[in-house]
Image (spheres, helix red, strand yellow):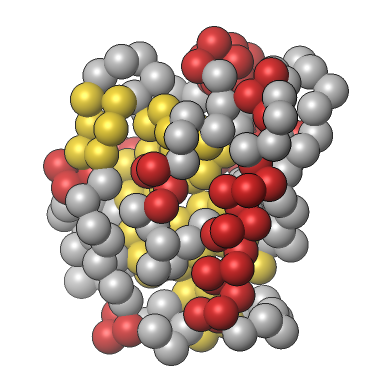
Amino acid sequence: MNPRRISPSRAPFRAGAAVALCALLAGCAGTGAADGGPDGGDNRFISGDGNVTEYKAADRKGLPAVGGEQLDGKAFKLADLKGKVVVVNFWASWCAPCRGEAPSLQQVYDEKKAQGVEFLGVNFKDAKPNAQAFERKFKVTYPSLFDADGRVTLAFRDVPPSAIPSTLVLDRQGRVAARIIGATTYTKLNPLVGKVLAEK
C-alpha cells in the first residue's frame, strides 16, 4: 500500500506494522490483563497517538475471512456486511482510552447507521463479563466479536490495528480505507466515515 498520512508518523509502515502487532499481542496478554473491568484501575494498553492513515482506493487491500462469536453468543461474519461502509473498533474493558472514546464511537454510529454504516467492535484479550459490563455502562448498541485469544485481530495483519484502541474504516468492498492508531474522537472519526460513505 502507499498510504497518504494525514498525521505525521516516522516509523516505516510495513516493518512497524509487524513489530506493532507482535507488541500488541504480547503486551495485551500479560498476566491478569483480562482481570480489569470498566470500573477497575487496570490501565494496561499499547498506546497509540491517534495517528490517522487514509488509503487511496487503488491502494486498498481486502481482508481475509473474518468471523467469530459476538459477545451475545451469536455467530458473525464480516463478509455479510459487504456493500456497506463498516467501522471496526478494537477495544478492551481494561483499556482506559477505550472508555474515553466509547461515547464518540456510539455517537458516530447513531448518526450514520441510517445511511447504511455498520459498526463492529473487536473485544481483545478480555473477560466476557467485563466486556459485557463495559457495553452496558457506555450504552454500546453495535455488536462486538469476542476475541479472547487474539485470532480475530490476527486476521487484520495486513493492516494491523497495532494498538488498543484502534479503529478501521472499511469501504463498501470490504477494503481498509482508513486507520486510526490509538483513541479516536467524534471530530476525527465522523469526517473519515463521511468521506468513505460519499464514495461511489
Q: Position of residue 28 (x, y in %)?
A: 65, 41
Q: Is residue 134 above or below residue 25?
A: above
Q: Position of residue 7 (x, y in %)?
A: 67, 77
Q: Is residue 1 above or below residue 73?
A: below
| 105 on left or right of 173 | right
| 163 on left or right of 81 | right
Residue that extends furthest to the right in the rendered view of this protein: 41
| 117 on left or right of 138 | left
* Residue 107 vs residue 2, the one in the foreground: 2
| Quarter-of-image position of residue 20 | bottom right
Q: Position of residue 122 (x, y in %)?
A: 45, 38
| 94 on left or right of 25 | right
Instruction: Look at the image and tell me in which quarter the C terminus lies.
Output: bottom left
Q: Residue at x 67, y 81 (%)?
A: 11
Residue 77, can we see it? Answer: yes
Q: Residue at x 23, y 58 (%)?
A: 64
Q: Position of residue 116 (x, y in %)?
A: 26, 45
| Quarter-of-image position of residue 16 | bottom right
* Residue 108 vs residue 169, the one in the foreground: 169
Instruction: Look at the image and tell me in which quarter the N terminus lies.
Output: bottom left
Q: Residue at x 77, y 38 (%)?
A: 44
